[in-house]
Amino acid sequence: MQAIWRLWVKHDPWAATCTKTGNFPQLQSNNIITQYIKMDIKFENIDKVSGKLTVKVAPEDYQEGLEKSLKDFRRKANMKGFRPGCVPMGLVKKLYGPEAKAEEVSKVVNKAISDYFKENNINVLGHVLPDSEQKEQDYKERDEFEYVMDVAIEPEINVSLDKKDKLPYYDIEVSDKFVDERINEMLMAHGTFEQVDEYQKGDYMKGDLVEVEAAEGAEPLKVEGVLISPEYVKDEEQKKLFDGSKKDDVITLKPASLYGDGTQAAAMLKIKKDELKDHEGNFTYTITEINRRKPAELNREFFDSILGKDVVKDEKEFREKIHEEYNKAQTGSSDYKFFEDLRTYSLKKAGDMEFSEPLLKRLMKENNPDKDDKYIDDNYAGATEQLKWQLVRDHLAVAAGIKVEDSDMRQMAKTHTRRQFSAYGMQLPDELVEKYAEKSLKDEKQIEELFYEVLSEKLIAAYKNIVTLEHKKISLEDFEKLVKEEQKNK
């Protein structure tokens, strides 16, 4: 688990994974500072949003680390003619010296830059970039080095929120009709099946399929006990064949095109998918059963099965409780809308922001090496709009004292895991939830998604108390229309 979560730092969407460009060491933004490195560093502001950083490295800046590194190389070296750990240091330096020097110089430069930016309160966008006139470094022949770097600086963010700031908060209320529909669904889901003689919409049937005309030299395919739900048949012409059908009726149909899905058709015929081409003709389907779901009764037993024993005692209390629960369930949607309004309001209050376009485009290019200049130009405006919100959001988080802890990340990873599997009707035991959650915390992309979901939740909780909420009651239907209209106008 990265300690960076415990510190609460801004994540920069412009910053790529840092690597060396030639022999040029780039700033690694996730360095955890443990010791301050003093070095000859000069920073010059070009303008408010860009600067030039010059770092001069002397042998004493990296010598101690280099010697330790070479000793480690020697201890681990396994060379023919020498016992392990007994390779002459002169040979080690000759073989590994330049590489080890480059590595140590890169470490101390990165560290010194991080320290310098922290001490001087310089907020950098992305990572430092090599100056266009930066010379290639010769780590074999030289002991002193100079690096010149371009730096994109974060613009000044002037936005603060308090009780004087008013934002709408929509209290969503579900209708009686909505509650009736949900209760009916519950009654059906908890109901039983009974056999009937004539098909109605929603019934499913069981029957036997027999191929009318088999391929030459083959026996007709026969499959017993095939379940068909006519309501889900995709082929409209074939769906009509089931209208008014009765038990013991014989229907002629084509299973291969019944559902518009070869996999489902093959499963129905109990054959391999690649064998389906040999059975695309007509089959007879003899209906042996027609089953109809009978809804459960609206009684005390049903109430207990839905809400728990003795939570309610009659239908009136049951409907009131269901209504209350569905109203509570809309809190997530209300919070989402509040977060969107908070974003719009905060960005407007922050006003225009100035960026170093040339440097940000270079950062975009590094993050998208397979894209041409036209792509960068076309997407620059949208990328800076996204960046503005990320900067404002991070500013709001710091102002509210928000921290994303390890425990927050782990809990969100578990929530995601449960949510993903419940979508397939699966409830995992705790030990499996833990296993999948830990796996997600090793994936960089998932870590970022989890981090910002935790951060968003904390921002919502904090700013619902910081600003003044203007509560507005709204029906679920009108709320959905409102959100849809706003999304259309973006």
Image (cartoon, grey):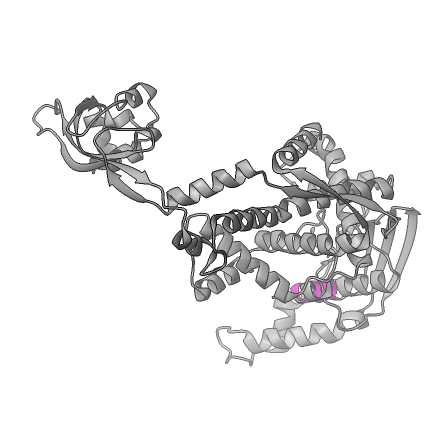
Above/below status of 16 relative to 404: above
464 and 172: which one is in front? 172
Q: Is residue 40 visible?
A: yes
Tell me: 27 left or right of 232. Answer: right
The answer to which quarter of the image holds residue 23 is: bottom right
Judged left or right of residue 121, residue 5 is left
Q: Where is residue 63 in the image (x, y as percent from the top left)?
A: 75, 73
- Toward the top, the furthest residue is 237
Closer-to-camera residue (344/241): 241
Image quadrant of residue 292? top left
| Residue 24, visible in the rendered structure | no
Q: Residue at x 30, y 35 (%)?
A: 263
Magenta-drawn segment: 98-107
Of residues 13 and 299, which is closer to you in this image? 299
How far from the left and from the top, in percent, is residue 451?
65, 56
Foreground residue, 406 or 483?
A: 483
Residue 438 counted in the magenta span: no
Question: Residue 221, located in which quarter of the rendered image?
Answer: top left
User: Could you say where residue 29 lies in the image, as x and y percent from the top left?
Assistant: 73, 58
Which residue: 76% across, 38% down?
Answer: 385
